[in-house]
Image: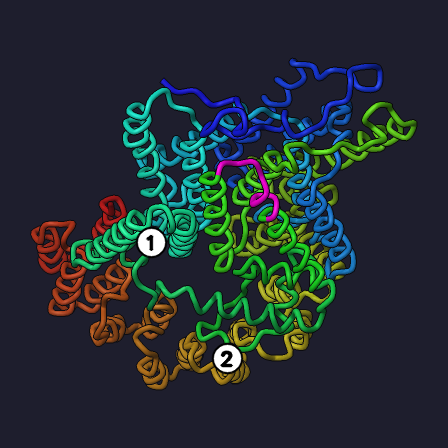
Amino acid sequence: MAKPSATSSREKKGSSIPGPSTRTKTAPEGPGNPPKSPSHNRLQYGLFLLSLLTPALFSSNVFFGYTSVRVLYFEGIVTIMALLAVWQESVWRQKPSLLQWSILAFLGITAIANLLGVDAQNSFWSSFARMEGFVTYIYLGLYFLLITRFQFSARQWTVALAVSVSIALLLTIFVLSTKAGRHTSDERLMGTFGNPTFMAIYLLQQLGILSLVALRIEWKSRRVRNVTKLSGLGVAAIVLLGGMVMTGSRSSFIGLAAGIVILSVLLAIRNARTQPKRVLLYAAIAVGLAGIVWFISQTDTVQHQPIIYRLTHLSGSTDTWQPRKISNQIALNAFVERPLLGWGQDNYNYGFASYYVSSLAPEGSDWYDRVHNVPLEWAFSGGVLGFLAYLAIWAGGLFQLIRSSLPAMQRYVLIAVLTAYFIFNLFNPDSILALQGFFLLLAFIDTSFTKDGLQSVTPQLATNRPAWLLPVRGVAIAGLVILAYFAIITPAKTLRQLNQFNRQSSLFERVTLLEQTYRAATVGKIDVADQLVTLALSSLNDANVSAVDKQGCYDRAVNIWGEVCQQHPQSSRYKARLASLYIAHDDYARAFPLYEEAVAIEKGKRPALFVQIGSAHLQQGNVAAAMTDFKQAYQLEPRWETPLVYEAMAYVVDHKPAQADSLLYKVSDAGLVANIALVKQAYYMMRNPAGLMNRLRRVKFRHQFLPEIYVDWTTAAFDAHDADGLLTALNAFSWHHGIVYDYSILKQIYTDAMERNVSPTERMRELVAGLAKNRF
């Protein structure tokens, strides 16, 4: 019924744009300019389509499989594309466009910033959890350059964009239909992306690409076009929007709204003179629809759904502005110290430790390892030069988009999509799939950019093959092979060995494997070392492990993590990690000096570190020192109440339950909810479950209770043999979550507890687990 257009907009009014086939002046065929092979083009295009499968790849059996598998696959495809491109003269023949120069300059400045940063190794290789080091950006830059120079036709571009959207639709339908990939705490949809926010921006980009595809398809008749758009494309848009809603990502809808506003403004400017009434009508419809959606979202039935509540509120546990404010302010403070070239990529933990200000963190957060603002992150990572280089990419893309041969409506949609992505990035860090989508759109813009209809070629390569081309090709191939070995093959081996690690039954074999993996690793080197430390900590607490094996594992973990601290001497985080390992082995003499070094690096400003030191003193039996540490943490930031709970536990250890109970009653309701596990532990250490029950009963606003808290409440009432307390807890649970269950179920739990002495714990856990399954 429809087919992608392959004609230029100058040849046929209203059809799709020209592809790269119209952008390059082609020299006469001859020895220096052989004709392009159709099979060559098909192979390149096939690899391009394979690169679009990156979002569909995921493995739950691989270390951080939602990131590592995708990145390695993507880099592998790009490597094959690059090796193929080395021998294609048309790739070398074209002059770089403004956008291509912008990306090359960005990569060059970023490389220098990383080399001169505080941790070049981490900047270049990153970790398996992120895999966003400089090496990944090299491949993203290559990806952009290759697909802009492969000269795909307009039809090929339209099909590729349609394939990208189709993959997004299939992923969304699969996740929604199976209820798989939900966030454990609030059931937000994250699919195979590892983070709801990362899925949200991916779907937002694909929603824009869907609009672009709808505009690029040439329809046989207006009736067919209208029916198809309203049915197939409309349903596709609803699916993508539904997936965005289920992610609970407010910033994605802020970006969407910004994109729609920009698109509306552009359309209004274009139609203001010719169709002013239509502009007003569209504006009225948009305002009316927005009002209807907002009205429906505020109804009690809709607000009862946790995800909708999160999307429409910024308070309590849904208030994520404070963490963003903290990370952004610290990044600004750190930027002032190194303003020219910054700290290097993936080194925010160094700036965080040096410029942490407790007044910025009412929640007393332990660590923020990312700046939640992409432009600011590049200012921190690359200084003024890196920040300007990043903005230059956007400026170059916008310049070429405005001057491209695309029809006006397609340009407007692209501007709206890029606006939505930029606004989203003001509240979030980047992710590999969002970056791939961004560079894909930039490549599409670059291939459709023309100046007087043509893109000039490098004169030296237009009619002959210069002598330097052959050695340059040799260097390029060698560089690609070396890069692939260290950036793809070695990390793949590391992941395979980490997978084998989980299958080893012998502690000695597991430790040996981790040691060998650590020595050979590039990407994720610290991840492997951390796995060894985790193994050592677990073995020290395992009664089934012999003393000899415990000591052997501990010694080797100390040796490896000691190397990590030596290679990263300014990392307070790594020093505190080694100190915790010493504490687990009761080696306090070696632990506390490391804690002192960490405090010095952080200038004694981070309360969470003092809580960690106080816990170590408490484990040592030095209650007085522990209380001093907890008081110090609380004084640094009185709004963070976790130190109060720890201080209460210190009183419990010191056999002073009255003082402990008094402190626990000073904790606010919000602090109680945030630290419920510690509060429960304190009361049970005092053998006073009734105290926990009464403390929970006194909370006025129980809407902030997570369902799991009712498990603790009913258990405490049962352990205290308090029938009224149990009834109160069950009634409170019914009030907030009883819409899912018949009250007779809760009544049976009460009867079993009081008459048959059956603990309500397991039954309540089943009900809480069932709540997640019944959401949406």
Of 300 and 25, the residue lying toward us? 25
Amino acid type indicated by mark 1: Asp
Label 1 environment density (alpha carbons within 10 Å; few <14, some 14–19, many ≥20)? some
766 or 470: which is nearer to us? 470
The x and y percentages for residue 541 are: 52, 56
Q: Earlier in the sequence, mark 1 or mark 2?
A: 1
Is the residue marked by circle 2 packed among few (<14), some (14-19), or many (20+) residues within 10 Å?
some
> Residue 502 is drawn in which quadrant?
top right
Residue 440 in the image, given as x and y percentages of width and height: 57, 38
Residue at the image point whose x is 70% and y is 51% from the top: 106
Q: Position of residue 131 (x, y in %)?
A: 61, 46
**Dot label at residue 359:** 2
Q: Is residue 653 visible to the viewer in this orientation of the structure?
A: no
Q: Which residues are magenta?
A: 399-407
**Is residue 1 in the magenta section?**
no
Location of residue 335 with respect to 639 vertically, above or below:
above
Per the image, label 1 sits on a secondary structure element best described as: loop
Q: Foreground residue, 291 or 515? A: 291
Looking at the image, residue 278 sits to the left or right of residue 526; the answer is: left
Q: Which residue is mark 1?
A: 186
Left or right, 10 with reference to 688: right
Report helix, strand or loop for mark 2: helix
Q: Nearer the viewer, residue 764 or 164?
A: 164
